[in-house]
Amino acid sequence: MFGGIEAGGTKFVCVVGDGPEEILERKRIDTTDPSTTLAACLEFFAGHEPIRALGIASFGPLELRRSHPDYGRVTTTPKPGWSGADLVGPFVERLGVPVAVDTDVNGAALAEVRWGAAMGLRNAVYVTVGTGVGGGAVIDGTPVAGLVHPEMGHVSISRLPGDDFDGVCPFHGDCFEGMASGPAIEARWGRPAEEVEDTQRLVEIEAATIAAGLRQIVYVLAPERIVLGGGVSKLAGLHDRVNIELVGQMSKYAVMAAHQSGFVVPPGLGDDAGVAGALALAAAAL
């Protein structure tokens, strides 16, 4: 059995299992300060039969260079108290097993390739559109990271004709996240997505905006499939509309990707993509 942690800004989900269909136990732990939250996670794993390895799919930013002295730590984050928090050290010391850490979206991408909507593919991207926008990439079966991990939510995108919305990203204004996230919808419409009455127009604008962000990702990474998740992605008809918009925006360029049926798809693992990603990272660590 492996251990997995989906580490989020509001909750940590700890699981023991061997994959998304074989999760033996899970526990939700509210995200408070690092010492309290990680101690509760350690207590969960200490109460089980020994696990062989642990994977952590976490919010970021993270230091992922194994040669760096701060490997496994959260870097500069707006989450109070979490900048510099060590996500790996306490588990290595207490559990004595291999521990791997990556971003939550890289973990989800790995899980979707291994068990979900991108199963059998070597190159795929997972993009989540919710409170923020983030993306993880698996290239030749391996999650991508370099100097830092990918920040797909902050790529620049083309505005729709006549759109004068400023965007909500505090760093870039009208980047992918600033224009397509849940807070962007609320700022644009004056209410959350679930309360917008003109759902058809909402889906049209959101799909075109998301397609503008995905177009940049397709041109740079040439994935075989894009898995689109997150709360905003649950808008009825959004995936079909995004596929149509993406084809149109690419203007017959790189048709090998955009014209494939089902190129942008919902997660095959649903809301379990994160914890499944953590288990996949544990297997890789072993």
Image: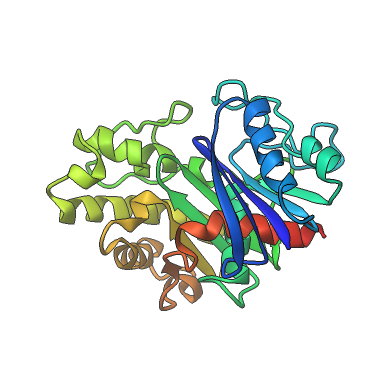
Residue 164 shows up from this direction: no
Place residue 46 in its image quadrant.
top right
Quarter of the C terminus within the rendering: bottom right
The answer to whether residue 246 is above or below residue 83 is below
Give the number of callouts: 0
Residue displayed at 44% across by 77% down: 260
Q: How is the image coloured?
A: rainbow
Q: Nearer the viewer, residue 57 or 41?
A: 41
Residue displayed at 78% across by 41% down: 91
Residue displayed at 54% across by 70% down: 116
Q: Nearer the viewer, residue 265 or 100?
A: 100
Quarter of the N terminus within the rendering: bottom right
Q: Nearer the viewer, residue 119 or 81?
A: 81
Q: Position of residue 143 (x, y in %)?
A: 68, 57
Q: Position of residue 97 (x, y in %)?
A: 84, 50
Residue 247 shows up from this direction: yes
Q: Nearer the viewer, residue 9 or 188?
A: 9
Looking at the image, residue 21 sits to the left or right of residue 279; the answer is left
Q: Residue furthest top?
A: 81
Residue displayed at 36% across by 60% down: 249
Q: Position of residue 70 (x, y in %)?
A: 80, 32
The answer to whether residue 3 is above or below residue 122 is above
Q: Position of residue 155 (x, y in %)?
A: 50, 43
Place residue 175 in its image quadrant.
top left
Looking at the image, residue 81 sits to the left or right of residue 239; the answer is right
Q: Residue furthest left?
A: 197
Looking at the image, residue 130 sits to the left or right of residue 84; the answer is left
